Amino acid sequence: MQQHISYKKATILVMIITLLSKITGFLREILLGSAYGATYVTDAYLVSLTIPQTLFASIAAAIGTTYIPLYSRIRVEEGSEEAVRFTSRVLNVVLVISTALAVLGMVFTRPIVSLIAMGFKGEVLELAVGFTRITFPMIIFIGMCQIFISFLQANNEFVLPALIGIPNNMIIIAVLLLSDMVGSYGLVFGTLVGSVVQLAVLLPGVFKKDYRYSRVLNFKDPYVVKVAALALPVMLGSTVQQLNALIDRMLASGLPEGSISALNFANRLNGFAYGLFTVSVATVIYPLLSRLSAEEDMAGFKDKLIKALNVITLIILPITVGAVVLRRPIVSVLFERGQFDARATSMTASALMFYSLGMVFYGYRDVLNRTFYSLQDTRTPMLNGVLTVLCNIVLNLILVRFMQHDGLALATSLSAMIMTLLLFANLRKRLGGIGGRKLLGAFLKCGVASLIMGVAVYWLNGIAAEYISMSSKMVGFLILALEIGFGALLYFGLIYLFRVEEVKWLIDMVKKRLRISE
């Protein structure tokens, strides 16, 4: 029972910290839009982050994911000191590989950028090459951060890993506020410094957990080989998922100016709720499912899995409907200022609508992937990921012709839906059923409540739209907040009437965190 309470407390605490990180991240995006708008400068900056933040971050995360169960096993069987030495051996291998990749990337920046952004020519290509040469060293710090994040999570420390995004965002915000003085290259250097600061924030917590660095490099170490063997399918699965974003940017680079930026801003908005809730749930439920799987408690395993999926349904479905209905005022109020004009608002709002259609499936996908990992099956998510990327490529090539950048956003959502259905089918076959009736029942109840809320908010927004367009940004923000608040109250009132089981679970979780339960 205590472990169950701790699980709920950890989840809500990670959500709170993630909310703060997402808020600062939003402020960063708002200032980026204000300073540079949906222009070729922003496009070049976003392309420069593709390798370190999109591709290598997935590789590092895959290593971290497989590191956790091995670390736990070594600590139980051979003691904490050996587990710490194992951490250093993995860290040293990651350091060597990431440093080599960073150096190669800095040497061959031009052909790499030309491959990633095939539509870039002239000034925008030169700018992207210059930016990317600066961001390549981020690979080293991202790799180290991921190992230390996994080390902390394996030692039941979830807060510090969730916090590191905040100082990183604050550094970039400071640079953007000084954009007239430091220019676009200042933004890129600030982003590099932010990755260094993230590592610095983690180190005190790492050493507090009795970590001691040892200079041992052995690529043939049995446990290091085991990490590599387990990580490879996860790595491929994560990388092919990130290839969706890479392919989007490759195709968008040949579309009208600002297409990459519009997709980025829309994806950031879409990722706010997705990252806040689904990542928090997936992060905390992974060690819990791993423990239940090891104990062969499959009844408890299925129960926790269904709860996690239903919580995602409960929270993400209304946000999806709200994002579709309020897409234009959301983008206008948050971003339309400075260099971010009405054209950029229109492009971003339409992309937001199509990205939002897949939001709940992104959440399901993350939890289901972790579910397979907890069953020591890293192959199934990888194979499904490969099939999904192939689907995404085909859909991209078809839809981009008719819908331009909106087609890329819709293809991403449809691909996420396809992967989720494949994962559900595989998991059902693996476990002999996962409680589909409970999942479908919660989905239908939340879906009906979300649609009713959406109609009501659409009507209210029709009345408020005139006032938003004529008012200051602050007044527009307040009106938008009232619309969202009205929709949230209506939705939660409806799901309470519909007796959605997870409503009580969420309320209890909040009460226990705030220490107001009996």
Image: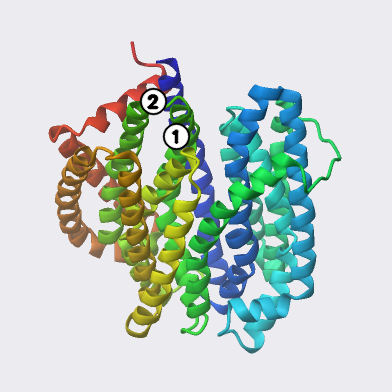
- Kindly tell me whether residue 358 is visible in this rendering: yes
Determine which quarter of the picture holds residue 293.
top left
Image spot of residue 422 (x, y percent): 34, 56
- Disc 1 residue crowd, few under 14, some 14–19, many 20+, Cα 10 Å: many
The residue closer to the viewer here, 433 or 400, is 433
Give above or below for 496 relative to 94.
above
Which mark sits nearer the N-terminus, 1 or 2?
1
Label 1 residue SS:
helix
Determine which quarter of the picture holds residue 71.
top right
Q: Is residue 205 left or right of residue 360?
A: right
**Which numbered circle lies on residue 285?**
1
**Which numbered circle lies on residue 232?**
none
Determine which quarter of the picture holds residue 403.
bottom left
The residue closer to the viewer here, 316 or 346, is 316
**Which numbered circle lies on residue 297?**
2
Amino acid at pointer 2 = Asp
Image spot of residue 37 (x, y percent): 52, 71
> Is the residue under label 2 in contact with that under label 1 (CB below 8 Å)?
no
Which residue is at a point 27% across and 40% down the rendered structure image? 433
